């Protein structure tokens, strides 16, 4: 009798738990789906207009043709519906471009980038080029606070939006997944080849730091120096449970709804140590980017792509170029211990490294404390250029001189 009772009681909780989990999933889906950013026009009115008018009617010309001046799309008027999600509707990337935005077709994507070149150049020598690689969810926009100061440290400055981020197109019909790390590395050097750039310095933030390390490992002859900002070297931007959710239909809807709602803004705020310093323009930019065409489909494809996994085995032979690491001490997304471990592995392998920690700073020091970041960046360049291989140093910036609000001289 005891065994019969045990079987009945064990079977009942399993069925109940399955029902409870299903109800929770549906509840989360319905709750967060209602929290999308809403516009000023009604859904019905806007989508009727969207169907009746072509892209050119909104003043948008895809390709090399300029934007028309007659009509401009109202970004906040676009509101997503279940129908628009199925059709991958959304605003074209060119709608959000800046005055200095540039576009080029390369490796099956329409790449958005920004580029500056100094007039000074030594005759017969290649320009000193620095390429900025954003992190997960970032774009060229995240370099806005340090774009001008960085011009003082190089002769050519390039920032680009990798596939799945910013204003670069989000193709869905390619045979190869264009959202993987190896594809991003191939795209990086394809762009450099188009500009005739043989060698460069790489500055990578978060996931862009992993890309910089991978590029230095696979193309050592083309990378002079790398600077890593809060690098996500030993981490996966997509936790396993998120990847598992994307494998189910309801999971896809749930995750996309969560990222588009207040959860996405919460993650953005978590990247900053002092939440009061987050500019409204950054929040508004995030709200607009998630409305781009194919945004949610590209997010799903990004989760399916193979990430760049940098292991200690990859670093065991060291890097042929010097490595500077800058990390906010109060980073809640990537702990500073990750950079300490990275520096230890590189120095053990004989690489010249320098780790600078910025107090009172979160995951995005180049946005939150741009003055302090530039001081650490210039310091890293100066010291790494004069140090020999196998030297390393871990520095903590003076808290009095780098307290938020102070100005670094």
Image (cartoon, helix red, strand yellow):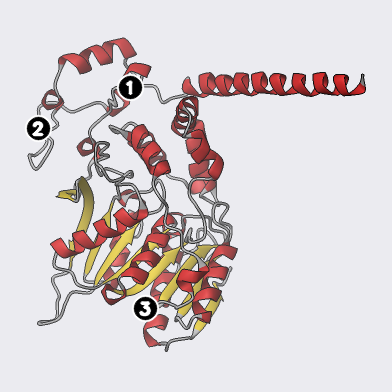
| Mark 2 vs 1: CB contact within 8 A | no
Residue behind mark 3: 321
Q: Residues within 10 Å of mark 2 (few under 14, many from 20)?
A: few
On screen, 325 above or below 286?
A: below
Q: Quadrant of residue 203?
A: bottom left
According to the picture, the residue beneath numbered tag 1 turns out to be: 86
Question: SS of the residue at dot 1?
Answer: helix
Rendered location of residue 2, percent (x, y): 92, 22
Q: Say whether disc 2 or disc 1 marks the residue closer to the N-terminus.
A: 2
Residue 409 appears in the figure: no
Badge 1 or badge 3: first in the primary sequence: 1
- The tag on residue 68 is 2
- With respect to residue 391, does 278 lie above or below? above
Q: How many marks?
A: 3
Which quadrant holds residue 62? top left
Residue at 46% x, 63% y is 310
* Nearest the eye: 85 or 90: 85
Q: Nearer the viewer, mark 2 or mark 1?
A: 1
Q: CA distance from mark 2 to mark 1?
A: 28 Å
Q: Quadrant of the N terminus?
A: top right
Single out the mark in the foreground, 1 or 3. Answer: 1
* C-alpha span from label 1 to label 3: 47 Å
């Amino acid at each position: 009798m005891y065994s019969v009772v045990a079987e009945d009681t064990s079977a009942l909780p399993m069925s109940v738990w399955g029902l409870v989990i299903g109800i929770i999933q549906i509840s989360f889906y319905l709750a967060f789906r209602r929290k999308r950013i809403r516009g000023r026009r009604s859904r019905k009115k806007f989508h009727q207009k969207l169907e009746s008018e072509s892209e050119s009617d909104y003043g948008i010309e895809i390709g090399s043709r300029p934007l028309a001046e007659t009509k401009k799309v109202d970004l906040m008027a676009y509101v997503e519906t279940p129908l628009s999600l199925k059709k991958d509707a959304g605003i074209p990337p060119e709608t959000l471009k800046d005055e200095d935005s540039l576009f080029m077709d390369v490796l099956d994507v329409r790449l958005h980038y920004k580029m500056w070149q100094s007039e000074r150049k030594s005759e017969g020598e290649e320009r000193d080029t620095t390429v900025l690689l954003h992190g997960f969810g970032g774009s060229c926009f995240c370099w806005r606070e340090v774009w001008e100061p960085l011009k003082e440290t190089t002769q050519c400055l390039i920032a680009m939006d990798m596939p799945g981020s910013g204003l670069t197109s989000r193709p869905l019909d390619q045979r190869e997944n264009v959202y993987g790390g190896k594809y991003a590395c191939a795209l990086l050097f394809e762009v450099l080849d188009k500009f005739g750039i043989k060698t460069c310095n790489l500055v990578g933030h978060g996931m862009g730091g992993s890309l910089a390390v991978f590029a230095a490992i696979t193309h050592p002859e083309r990378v002079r120096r790398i600077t890593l900002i809060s690098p996500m070297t030993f981490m996966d931007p997509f936790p396993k449970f998120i990847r598992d959710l994307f494998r189910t239909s309801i999971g896809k809807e749930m995750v996309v709804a969560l990222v588009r709602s207040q959860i996405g803004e919460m993650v953005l705020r978590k990247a900053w140590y002092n939440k009061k310093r987050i500019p409204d323009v950054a929040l508004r930019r995030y709200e607009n980017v998630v409305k781009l065409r194919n945004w949610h489909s590209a997010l799903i494809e990004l989760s399916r792509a193979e990430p760049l996994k940098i292991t200690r085995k990859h670093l065991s032979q060291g890097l042929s170029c010097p490595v500077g690491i800058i990390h906010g001490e109060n980073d809640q997304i990537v702990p500073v211990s990750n950079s300490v471990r990275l520096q230890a592995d590189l120095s053990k392998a004989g690489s010249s490294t320098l780790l600078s920690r910025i107090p009172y700073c979160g995951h995005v020091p180049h946005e939150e404390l741009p003055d302090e970041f530039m001081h650490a960046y210039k310091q890293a360049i100066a010291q790494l250029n004069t140090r020999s291989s196998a030297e390393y140093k871990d520095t903590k910036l003076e808290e009095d001189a780098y307290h938020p609000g102070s100005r670094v001289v």
